[in-house]
Amino acid sequence: MDLGIRNKVALVLGGGGGLGRAIATTLSAEGAAVAISDKNEDALEETTAQLQNASLALKWDLADLDAVSGHITTIEDTLGPVDILVNITGGPPPTPVSGQDVALWGEHFRSMVLSVIAISDRVLPGMKERGWGRLVTSASSGVITPIPNLGLSNALRSALVGWSKTLSQEVGRHGITSNVIVPGRIATKRITFLDEAKAKRENRPVADVTADSVSSISVGRYGDPQEYADAVAFLASTRAAYITGSVLRVDGGLIASV
């Protein structure tokens, strides 16, 4: 299937590893020019080496909102205006939702929510002018079924769901879609970190924690990052023009709710 994104310009936030790397390489394989951002320069280099078309790597701390306009201008000058924006932000530390310092909330609200809004607002005018655009925001299964001890993540990512849905109603007539994609337990360093943290908290072997986690997934395994990336690529395609304001689960049947 031709996704119709050859020569489109994509920006993948958090493209240095895990889900972001899989998404960046998949969009590149489909013919898009891809810009990736990450705080880790080594990770950026590793991803860039796997990209097949024109690319740009930007060392970018998403919490630095003052840097947004300059980074987008660099992308526009190097690759062209952004047609596809994939919003992936790092996860906050595992914590209960109550009793957290307001400064911690503010720090992660800035890097996880305000950054996405600011970057989107910077690229949306150009998308409107061209009559085409795709915004795909990666969240967490916690926005549907809150995950114990991931209080900050559950709350902050849920804010992005409300933002994305509202945005879809504002920009749909301009040929722009805005969707949220929800990973279940995809085999990345983040999931390994969370399993290890839970094992330490509960004084259990990591293998037992992972086995319990896998047992709750209908397909009986963690997902592959490529499976997630393929779903993102479809939402970013011309084929998905009538899908907007949606929340797509890529979870192997993990989430129990209808």
Image: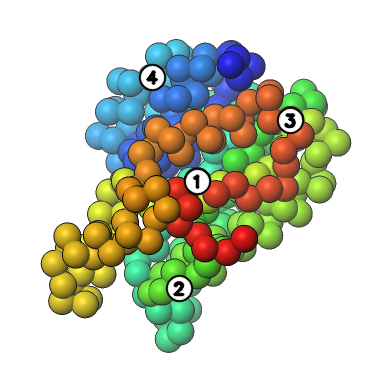
Q: CA distance from mark 4 to mark 2?
A: 35 Å
Mark 1 or 2: the one toward you: 1
The one of 76 and 100 positioned closer to us in this rendering: 100
Residue 136 x/y as whole percent: 60, 41
Q: Are marks 1 and 2 in contact (CB under 8 Å)?
A: no
- Give the residue furthest to the right: 173
Mark 4 or 3: the one toward you: 3
Could you tell me if residue 156 is visible in this image? no
Tell me if mark 1 has few (under 14), some (14-19) or many (20+) residues whose alpha carbon lies within 10 angstroms of its own: many
Q: CA distance from mark 3 to mark 2?
A: 34 Å
Q: Which mark is residue 51?
A: 4
Q: Amino acid at mark 4?
A: Leu
Q: Is residue 18 left or right of residue 235?
A: left
Tag 3 or tag 4, which sits nearer the N-term?
4
According to the picture, the residue beneath numbered tag 2 turns out to be 151
Disc 2 is placed on an element classified as: helix
Q: Is residue 203 above or below residue 256?
A: below
Q: Is residue 110 left or right of residue 5?
A: left
Q: Amino acid at mark 2?
A: Gly
Q: Which mark is residue 250?
A: 1
- Give the residue furthest to the bottom: 99
Q: Are marks 4 and 3 in contact (CB under 8 Å)?
A: no
**Which quarter of the figure is the N terminus placed in?**
top right
The residue at 76%/54% (across/down) is: 166
Tag 4 or tag 1, which sits nearer the N-term?
4
Q: Which mark is residue 147?
A: none
Mark 3 or 1: the one toward you: 1
According to the picture, the residue beneath numbered tag 3 turns out to be 241
Tag 2 or tag 3, which sits nearer the N-term?
2
Q: CA distance from mark 1 to mark 2?
A: 21 Å
